[in-house]
Image: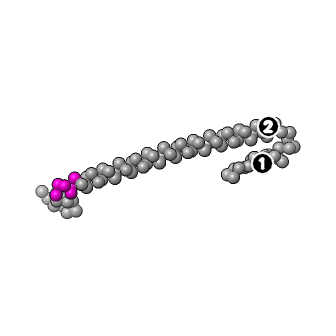
Amino acid sequence: MTGWRQLRSWPRTLGARLFLILLAGLTIAHVLSFAALFLERYNASRAMMLGMLEKDVSAAVAILDRLPRDERQDVAWRLDKRTYRFILT
């Protein structure tokens, strides 16, 4: 019985112990649920962002390929986006 005496912060009544166990279980469930939801949303938004980037870059490359070499520099600034731009070498 000395082991139980060392747990002075542990409640004495069975109801309080069950309440703490259920509270801990619900807290863990909520944290895991939030983590799963956050990871799913992160992956979905990342896939959508990369898909849009792929379409934008492929369309810009197709446009630049159809232009003569000396006109590409004049048109490249029109294809720039807020987060990236094209540098022609």
- Label 2 packing within 10 angstroms: few (<14), some (14-19), many (20+): few
As drawn, is 24 to the left or to the right of 65?
A: left
- Of mark 2 and mark 1, the one earlier in the sequence is 2
Q: Is 87 in front, or is 37?
A: 37
Residue type of the residue flagged with mark 2:
Asp
Q: Could you give the CA–CA distance between mark 2 and mark 1, rounded to whole angstroms?
A: 15 Å
* Residue 28: x %, y % from top left: 34, 50
Which residue position holds label 1?
Answer: 78
Q: Magenta stretch?
A: 13-18
As drawn, is 11 to the left or to the right of 44?
A: left
Instruction: Report the residue at 60% width, 44% height from top.
Output: 49
- Looking at the image, is 87 positioned above or below residue 67? below
Which residue position holds label 2?
Answer: 65
* Residue 46: x %, y % from top left: 57, 44
Q: Would residue 23 be visible to someone looking at this image?
A: yes
Image quadrant where residue 12 sits: bottom left
